[in-house]
Image: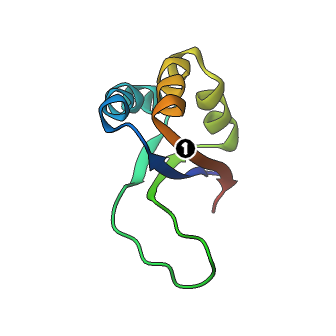
C-alpha cells in the first residue's frame, strides 16, 4: 500500500533552504519515493489551517517512508531543513 509524506513548511532562511532542496531529491528516490506536490498554489476550503509551502511525497509503503526519514542519506538534509524552516510532517497510508 502506498504511503504519503505530507509536509507544511514555513521557510525562514531561503539561502539555506536551497541547499536542502539540492540534497533531498536523491534521498527520496533512493527509497522509491517521488514528489507529487512541491510547493504549488493551494486554497483553504475549510478550517483554520493556513499552510505555507505544501509538499507531498509518495513512497511505495509506510515503511519505505519511515526508512527514508530515519536514513543516513536524509540526515544531513533534514538537519539543514530544521535550521532553515519550521515544519509539520506526517506519514499517511493511501490507496
Q: Is 49 placed left or right of 44 in the picture? A: right
Give the residue drawn at x 68%, y 43%.
Answer: 62
Q: Nearer the viewer, residue 18 or 14?
A: 14
Q: Furthest residue to the front?
A: 12
Residue 84 placement: quadrant: top left
Q: How far across and down, in percent of the image, does residue 43 sit?
A: 43, 77
Q: How far across and down, in percent of the image, does residue 70 sit?
A: 66, 25
Q: How far across and down, in percent of the image, does residue 29 sit?
A: 43, 32
Q: Is 18 placed left or right of 27 in the picture? A: left
Q: Is 78 placed left or right of 39 in the picture? A: right
Q: Nearer the viewer, residue 37 or 41?
A: 41
Give the residue drawn at x 63%, y 81%.
Answer: 47
For the C terminus, the quadrant is bottom right
Give the residue drawn at x 32%, y 38%.
Answer: 14
Scheme by which the image is coloured: rainbow
Crowding near pointer 1: few (<14 within 10 Å), some, many (20+)? few
Q: How far across and down, in percent of the image, does residue 91 sit?
A: 66, 49
Give the residue drawn at x 39%, y 29%.
Answer: 20
Badge 1 is on which residue?
86
Amino acid at each position: 500500500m502506498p504511503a504519503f509524506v505530507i509536509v507544511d513548511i514555513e521557510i525562514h532562511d531561503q539561502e539555506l533552504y536551497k541547499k536542502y532542496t539540492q540534497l533531498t531529491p536523491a534521498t527520496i528516490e533512493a527509497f522509491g519515493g517521488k514528489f507529487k506536490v512541491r510547493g504549488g498554489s493551494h486554497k483553504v476550503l475549510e478550517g483554520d489551517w493556513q499552510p505555507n509551502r505544501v509538499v507531498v511525497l509518495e513512497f511505495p509503503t509506510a515503511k519505505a517512508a519511515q526508512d527514508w526519514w530515519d536514513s543516513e542519506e536524509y540526515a544531513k538534509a533534514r538537519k539543514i531543513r530544521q535550521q532553515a524552516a519550521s515544519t509539520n510532517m506526517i506519514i499517511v497510508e493511501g490507496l
